[in-house]
Every structure is written in C-alpha cells, then in structure tokens.
Amino acid sequence: FVLTGTLESMQRSEAASLIRERGGTIVDAVGKNTDFLIAGANPGFNKIQGANALGIIIINENDFRKMLGAIKRSKPASAPVQQDFFR
C-alpha cells in the first residue's frame, strides 16, 4: 500500500497501523510491487501518475474503509487467513 493526500477520517499513521495489523505493508513510493494506492484529498501527482502507469489500483478513503470492514485483523499464526487484500 501507498498513501497519498490527506485522509479525512484518520491520520496517515493510523491508516498505516490498520494496514499493518491486517498483514499489509506500507511503502512511501509507488512501485511494481504496490497493490493499492490510497488517495485522499489533494493527492500527489507523481504517485497518481506512477500508479496509472503501472496499472495499480487507486482507491479513495471510502473504499479503503470498506476494505477495512471486510478484512479482520490478522489471526494468530496458527489460524488460517480466509481472504487477505493486504498481502
């Protein structure tokens, strides 16, 4: 995951923590291994352009919050994960 722009309902650090709790990884720049770009208000042009060029899925804050609701926090290592958007 890469974050860009200002999130209205949470701080970026909170969004990053929520992603990590679910087994995801946060990086600063869009690259070939990026699965999602979360775009808040006033997103960075270079990140949007890079995501478009690489075919990365761009989601808004509302879509991100829906995704969070669909995926529970990571289970203990011994329990199987049913579906994981965050890997």
Image: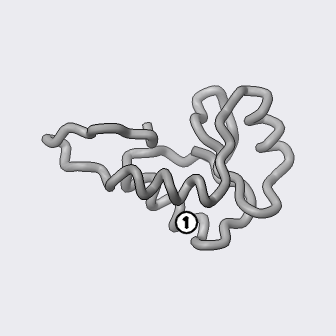
Label 1 Cα neighbours within 10 Å, binned few <14 / some 14-19 / many ≥20: few
Examine the image and state in which quarter residue 81 appears.
Answer: top left
Which residue is found at the position 29% from the left and 50% from the top?
A: 74
Q: Is residue 45 left or right of residue 27?
A: right
How many dots with numbers?
1
Q: Name the residue at the left extreme.
A: 78
In the rendered view, tell whether residue 22 sits above or below residue 87: below
Residue 58 place in picture, x, y as percent: 68, 42
The C terminus - image quarter: top left
Which residue is found at the position 27% from the left and 38% from the top?
A: 82
Which residue is found at the position 45% from the left and 56% from the top?
A: 68
Residue on which the image places disc 1: 13
In the rendered view, tell whether residue 28 sits above or below residue 87: below
Residue type of the residue flagged with mark 1? Ser
Residue 61 place in picture, x, y as percent: 63, 59
Colour convention: one colour
Q: Is residue 19 left or right of residue 58?
A: left
Which residue is found at the position 57% from the left and 44% from the top?
A: 1
Q: Name the residue at the right extreme.
A: 45
Residue 70 place in picture, x, y as percent: 40, 51
Q: Is residue 71 left or right of residue 32?
A: left
Secondary-structure class at tag 1: helix
